[in-house]
């Protein structure tokens, strides 16, 4: 069995061990922001791994991000993510029975889909401005969602549809809509979109949710 670390970024808590979190970057790639996000979660007691879906390439403009996403082989990436989940389960650093996922935009869609494919392995799930219309009947996860009020990429009708699907599957889902924000409001390297107040609130809610669901002492 191959226990080597997949391509990506690993952040460990001070104690070296903790509940496992899979962090899935947005279509920009594994930028310094997402690595910093991993470190912030590690400082809260989690073992965090962020796969690099673009193999080192990152985008700084929407046009570059569109190009990188268009070249991403979705099924291949999905299979690689399944392998990453297995890697986290085998990791000597991970103490939790399940793996939590935090996904942003493109990563949010992957997070939602993985929660139905690896239903016994994934719990909880946190998504930032992303949805997916998959069948959630097999999921065993609790969900938290952060969404922008004025989002040119994700309609609030899609959020309502996601909530309806999760409720119908008997899943717990808490969705927050952040007033006056747009897509990428959480990411401080997206200067036009970043909203400090909303980002701080979403961060606190995310950490509280993950700690509660994964039974991490505050």
Image (cartoon, helix red, strand yellow):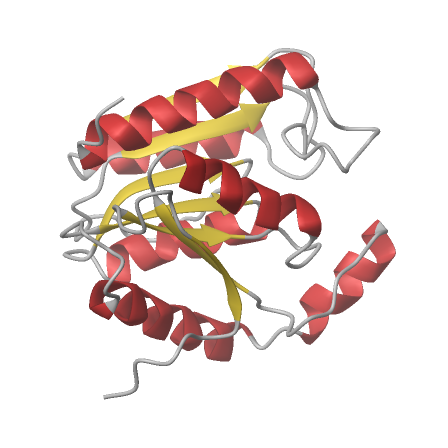
* Horizontal and vertical percent position of residue 217: 21, 26
* Horizontal and vertical percent position of residue 123: 23, 45
Which residue reaches farthest bottom? 1
* Horizontal and vertical percent position of residue 168: 20, 35
* Horizontal and vertical percent position of residue 207: 38, 27
Question: Residue at the spot x=37%, y=42% of the render?
Answer: 14
Considering depth in this image, is 124 or 203 the residue closer to the camera? 203
Question: Residue at the spot x=75%, y=62% of the render?
Answer: 58
Question: Residue at the spot x=43%, y=75% of the render?
Answer: 80
Quarter location, residue 121? bottom left
From what the image shows, is residue 146 above or below residue 67? above
Considering depth in this image, is 85 or 193 the residue closer to the camera? 85
Question: Residue at the spot x=27%, y=36% of the render?
Answer: 166
Question: Which quarter shows the N terminus?
Answer: bottom left
Residue 68 visible to an observer of this rendering? yes
Question: Which quarter shows the C terminus?
Answer: top left
Residue 172 visible to an observer of this rendering? no
Which residue reaches farthest front? 15
Tell me if 74 is positioned left or right of 144 in this view. right
From what the image shows, is residue 59 above or below residue 40? below
From what the image shows, is residue 195 above or below residue 137? above
Quarter location, residue 196? top right
């Amino acid at each position: 069995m191959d226990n080597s670390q997949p391509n990506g970024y690993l952040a460990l808590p001070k104690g070296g061990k903790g509940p496992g979190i899979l962090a899935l970057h947005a279509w920009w790639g594994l930028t310094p922001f997402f690595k910093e996000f991993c470190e912030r979660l590690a400082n809260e007691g989690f073992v965090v791994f962020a796969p690099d879906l673009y193999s080192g390439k990152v985008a700084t403009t929407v046009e570059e991000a569109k190009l990188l996403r268009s070249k991403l082989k979705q099924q291949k990436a999905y299979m690689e993510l399944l392998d990453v989940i297995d890697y986290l389960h085998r990791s000597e650093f991970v103490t939790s029975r399940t793996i939590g996922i935090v996904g942003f935009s493109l990563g949010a869609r992957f997070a939602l889909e993985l929660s139905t494919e690896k239903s016994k392995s994934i719990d909880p799930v946190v998504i930032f401005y992303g949805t997916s219309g998959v069948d959630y009947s097999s999921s065993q996860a609790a969900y938290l969602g952060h969404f922008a009020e004025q989002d040119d990429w994700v309609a609030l009708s899609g959020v309502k549809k996601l909530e309806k699907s999760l409720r119908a599957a008997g899943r717990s889902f808490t969705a927050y809509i952040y007033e006056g924000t747009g897509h990428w409001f959480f990411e401080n390297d997206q200067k036009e979109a970043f909203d400090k107040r909303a980002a701080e609130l979403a961060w606190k809610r995310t950490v509280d949710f993950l700690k509660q669901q994964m039974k991490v002492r505050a």
